[in-house]
């Protein structure tokens, strides 16, 4: 008799006090909420900025206000430091509570810009004005939404931006609200008018967008509020909308710009991130993957495709075009051009719910955050640790786009490839001079080499709740040096997701750790990544070690 029992996995990884990873508005900072306080990091380069250790005091949300010293704190299980229905404004410089906001239900999410705080409840979104001095904080108004257990909302934070987006009153809908433009310079907001009603919507909804037929699972916008990305609970499609294309009068729903396909099977979307220019989209899901779309490349490919179709002759093209309205959306959606598969969390067994061919073979060493990166002595303190996830699918991942200085000679998507000029022919060697030894030693010293040129490149930082920090680049890696003719080729080509063989770059299969060379255990980091995605740097944050 066969017994059909579910698969069980054993792990020696201790349960982590880490309860979440939270990015600020522009992704420059992130905070980790733990059961013993919180820690605030700089995203790039990875560096500890501030921490607070409070024994037996857990938090669920820790949101840094842009790049200031203010934090918004919300308590959570198992032993809340603050009630889960309160938002605490904490000044990290003075280490004191500035203010608190109390509600009748638990707080689900927070969004903030320099002059506004958006508190997301289960069926409401409440907007507060962040004043200075005597103005203080006052409630501007509230909006009704559908059931929103994830606490979804999107807020543009660039200067002069106005967009605020949150779920509508029906599942799958998105309300768009235009707030007052964010001033370029810090200016105290005006106090509320005498006839102000804090229970009514302070600003009218400019449009209601029917984004999906299923409930929303992800909602994000670029810092300027010109591009909006939505994902549903099915997790197969992410739709990109032109939030600025509502017409001259500001009315009407935004038009659909792209329909991005993550996959064919259902998944839970953890995070959707848009770059500063809104031209790149990153999606992390419970499949243990990070998909990336370059909207600029998709637009170029679409234009080239239209040119080919227009130049093609024959009767086959119009016949196929007649069938286009009847084809399912599967054929019209766009697949990601780059993909990265997260390695399994530390301490987990090699078995996973993923197929064996998709599992990451390389183990990840459990390395604490290096003090050389700015944490200083005692970086492992503070109650932060590693997540004892049962598989890679249970490891929640969030993403942030960063600008990194790279050598100007590297090839990339952000800069065209420059062909160096041919080297001049060598001059004939002069006759030996018997008086050459009498020359001064200063004249014989070679001229110092010119300083290498640098350029800015957009890269992606993926943060996992198990303490993984991955900096990903989407430009081709530098070509390896040609092997010596006498040496035999020992490296074998790797196969991409599309089945085409390619040569593996020397640094594409491993990420650096603490600025040093890659260890043996991290060589499998990029084995499941596509050819256009490579791990530039790999670090770990959190310091719970031992048995």
Image: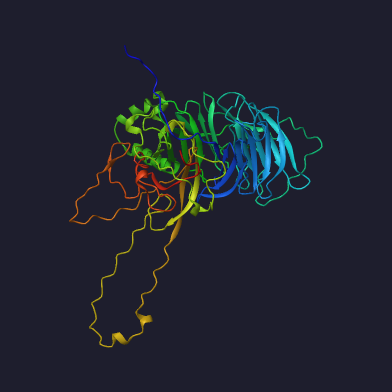
Q: Relative to 477, is 393 above or below?
A: above
Point 78% across, 35% down: residue: 196
Which sits in the foreground, 398 or 302? 398
Residue lying at the far left in this picture: please name it: 486
Residue lying at the far top in this picture: please name it: 1
Which sits in the foreground, 17 or 398? 17
Q: Relative to 419, is 397 above or below?
A: above
Q: Residue 105 placed where, x, y %? A: 67, 27
Which sits in the foreground, 456 or 14? 14
Does residue 354 appear anywhere in the picture? yes
Residue lying at the far right in this picture: please name it: 194
Q: Quadrant of the C terminus?
A: top left
Instruction: Count numbered badges in the picture.
Output: 0
Q: Is residue 72 left or right of residue 262?
A: right
Q: Residue 408 placed where, x, y %? A: 41, 58
**Res 197 quadrant in image:** top right
**Res 83 quadrant in image:** top right
Q: Relative to 68, is 230 above or below?
A: above
Point 35% across, 42% down: residue: 524
Q: Residue 153 placed where, x, y %? A: 59, 34
Q: Quadrant of the N terminus?
A: top left
Does residue 179 appear anywhere in the picture? no
């Amino acid at each position: 008799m066969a017994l059909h029992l579910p698969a069980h996995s054993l792990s020696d990884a201790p349960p982590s006090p880490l309860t979440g990873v939270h990015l600020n508005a522009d992704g420059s900072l992130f905070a980790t909420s733990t059961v013993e306080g919180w820690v605030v990091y700089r995203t790039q380069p990875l560096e500890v900025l501030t921490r607070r250790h409070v024994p037996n005091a857990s938090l669920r949300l820790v949101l840094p206000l842009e790049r200031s010293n203010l934090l918004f704190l919300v308590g959570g299980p198992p032993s809340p430091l603050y009630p889960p229905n309160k938002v605490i404004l904490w000044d990290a410089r003075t280490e004191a509570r500035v203010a608190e906001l109390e509600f009748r239900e638990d707080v689900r999410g927070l969004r903030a810009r320099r002059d506004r705080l958006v508190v997301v409840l289960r069926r409401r979104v409440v907007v507060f004005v962040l004043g200075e001095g005597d103005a203080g904080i006052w409630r501007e108004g509230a909006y009704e939404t559908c059931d929103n257990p994830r606490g979804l909302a999107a807020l543009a934070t660039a200067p002069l931006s106005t967009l605020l987006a949150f779920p509508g009153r029906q599942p799958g809908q998105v309300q768009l609200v235009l707030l007052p433009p964010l001033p370029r310079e810090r200016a105290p907001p005006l106090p509320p008018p005498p006839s102000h009603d804090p229970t009514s919507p302070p600003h009218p909804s400019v449009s209601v967008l029917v984004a999906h037929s299923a409930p929303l699972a992800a909602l994000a916008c670029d810092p300027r509020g010109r591009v909006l990305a939505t994902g549903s609970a099915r997790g197969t499609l992410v739709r990109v909308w032109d939030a600025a294309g509502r017409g001259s009068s500001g009315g009407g729903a935004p038009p659909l710009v792209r329909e991005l396909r993550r996959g064919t099977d259902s998944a839970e979307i953890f995070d959707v991130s848009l770059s500063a220019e809104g031209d790149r989209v990153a999606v992390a899901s419970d499949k243990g993957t990070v998909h990336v779309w370059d909207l600029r490349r998709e637009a170029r490919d679409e234009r080239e495709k239209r040119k080919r179709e227009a130049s093609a002759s024959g009767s086959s093209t119009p016949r196929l075009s007649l069938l286009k309205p009847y084809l399912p959306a599967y054929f019209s959606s766009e697949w990601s051009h780059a993909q990265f598969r997260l390695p399994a969390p530390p301490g987990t067994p090699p078995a996973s719910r993923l197929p064996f061919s998709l599992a990451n073979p390389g183990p990840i060493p459990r390395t604490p955050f290096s003090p050389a990166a700015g944490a200083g002595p005692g970086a492992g303190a503070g109650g932060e640790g590693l997540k004892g996830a049962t598989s890679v699918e249970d490891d929640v991942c969030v993403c942030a786009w960063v600008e990194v200085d790279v050598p100007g000679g590297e090839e990339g998507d952000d800069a065209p490839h420059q062909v160096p000029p041919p080297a001049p022919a060598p001059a004939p060697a002069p006759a030996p001079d018997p008086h050459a030894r009498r020359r001064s030693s200063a004249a014989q010293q070679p001229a110092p080499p010119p300083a290498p040129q640098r350029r800015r490149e957009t890269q992606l930082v993926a943060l996992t709740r198990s303490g993984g920090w991955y900096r990903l680049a989407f430009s081709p890696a530098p070509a390896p040096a040609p092997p010596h003719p006498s040496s035999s080729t020992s490296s074998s080509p790797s196969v991409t997701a599309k089945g085409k063989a390619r040569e593996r770059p020397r640094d594409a299969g491993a990420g650096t750790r603490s600025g040093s060379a890659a260890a043996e255990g991290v060589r499998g980091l990029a084995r499941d990544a596509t050819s256009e995605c490579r791990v530039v740097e790999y670090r770990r944050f959190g310091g719970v070690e031992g048995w």
